[in-house]
Image (cartoon, rainbow, N blue to C red):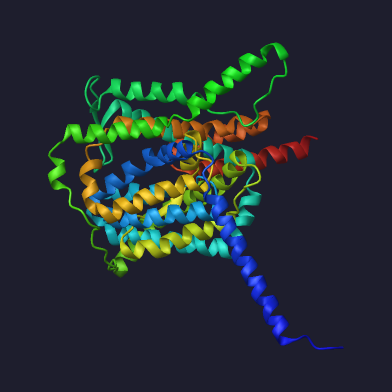
Amino acid sequence: MESQNPQTSENLDSNSTSLSRHNLVHKVKSNLVFRSKWAELNGAMGDLGTYIPIVLALTLAKDLNLGTTLIFTGVYNMLTGAIYGIPLPVQPMKSIAAVAISDGPDFNIPEIMAAGICTGAILLVLGATGLMQLVYKLIPLSVVRGIQLSQGLAFAMTAVKYIRKVQDFSKSKSKENRHWVGLDGLILAIVCACFIIVINGAGKERNERETSNVDDEERNMRSTRIKKTMANIPSAFIVFLLGVVLAFIRKPAMVKDIKFGPSSMEVVQFTSHAWKQGFIKGTIPQLPLSILNSVIAVCKLSSDLFPGKELSATSVSITVGLMNLVGCWFGAIPCCHGAGGLAGQYKFGGRSGGCVAILGAAELVLGLVLGTSLMRILDWFPVGILGVLLLFAGIELAMTCRDTNSKGECFVMLICTAVSLVGSSAAPGFVCGMVVHLLLKLRLHLFN
């Protein structure tokens, strides 16, 4: 038998490496391609109703480094778009943020970042060992739907609160009723909501029926042209730009306070007390929410909205873990993915990874150019407009549960939803939903 020529073997290895590199580049380009320029830009606005209030609250209450947070979340969003090819945005970890805002002076930046690092490390281990994928396969669909419905309704109720009440984000509290007239009044929010409804409607059905009646062909063509024209109007982007303009009108003097250039980036100094408090008060309540909403619900929603592009629970868990194991050391807000953000960006037209790449590029530029000075603008941004954007994101997420057909599945889903909403966490609802699901299976086995 003749031995293989070493030169030939080297050439084969070189060609294989070149082919793999070419395939990787092609995949990244395909993931970032715009299905529609204006639709993707509009979709990028779909998660701001969640992102801005939490970041604003932590910046006001805990002196979060806004510039550093924008730089890291910008990079995360661009990488997420390139890797997954769907509009999956990066969101702040809500439970950790809630603890930080409500716990007073005992839970500051070191504790917040320690909680993010510990949560990220656990998620990374769960993903790398394959345990997260096992959990994803074992959780029944009805329980996942209950989590999605509760999260969607929670977003919607929070949005209505933003619209109706004046907000103090630094204390995470609602104050007096919002005035009807004004640059952040009820009428402004209602007009913005009506504008979005007229442009976007209730959203596109995934399986629209096509009529074949010859008499209606001309009418259908005219209707299709009108729908395409309406779809090209970036309603959420227009509403967001209106908010930016109104912020400058409300406080013209803020222009003098804006300083150009990135804010300084420093490594956070941790103590043993910070690690302990961060894990007990931050990681423990955040972990169930991250597993259920940031991984399990996200993977299921991706298969609903993008058939054939279902995300791997292993991959999502690992990427969330890595984000926090890198950024939190430098003071960037603990981050995850979220079903609500994916639903919101889908609602407003996001269909590819280019959607979150646009958002990430904008965050990166703002972080480098304005840094912490951007806080001056966000502080005067009309909260009612943020409420409108969050409202549609929540409704879109809740509507994914409409495919629950059997009474038994609806029963489990609604119990899971009710307990989650009352308990202000997905964990109690998940436990109750799993118990009810198992009891129904046992009853079916015993009586059939």
| Front residue of this view, candidates 219 and 53 | 219
Residue 257 is situated, as x and y percent measured from the top left of the image, at 14, 47
Residue at the extreme top = 215
| Front residue of this view, candidates 302 and 13 | 13
Taking the image as shown, residue 208 lies to the left or right of residue 35, namely right
Q: Is residue 330 above or below residue 216?
A: below
Q: Is residue 341 above or below residue 114?
A: above
Residue 49 is situated, as x and y percent measured from the top left of the image, at 37, 38
**Quadrant of the drawing holding the N terminus:** bottom right
Quadrant of the image occupied by residue 278: bottom left
| Residue beneath the point at 61% across and 51% down | 136
Taking the image as shown, residue 428 lies to the left or right of residue 408, namely left
Q: Is residue 77 visible?
A: yes
Q: Is residue 92 visible?
A: no
| Residue beneath the point at 37% across and 62% down | 327
| Residue beneath the point at 61% across and 19% down | 221
Residue at the extreme bottom = 2
Residue 118 is situated, as x and y percent measured from the top left of the image, at 42, 62
**Quadrant of the drawing holding the C terminus:** top right
Taking the image as shown, residue 369 lies to the left or right of residue 347, namely left
Residue at the extreme right = 1
Q: Is residue 86 above or below residue 250?
A: below
Q: Is residue 228 above or below residue 5?
A: above
Q: How many marks?
A: 0
Taking the image as shown, residue 343 lies to the left or right of residue 132, namely left
Residue 298 is situated, as x and y percent measured from the top left of the image, at 54, 46
| Residue beneath the point at 52% across and 60% down | 318
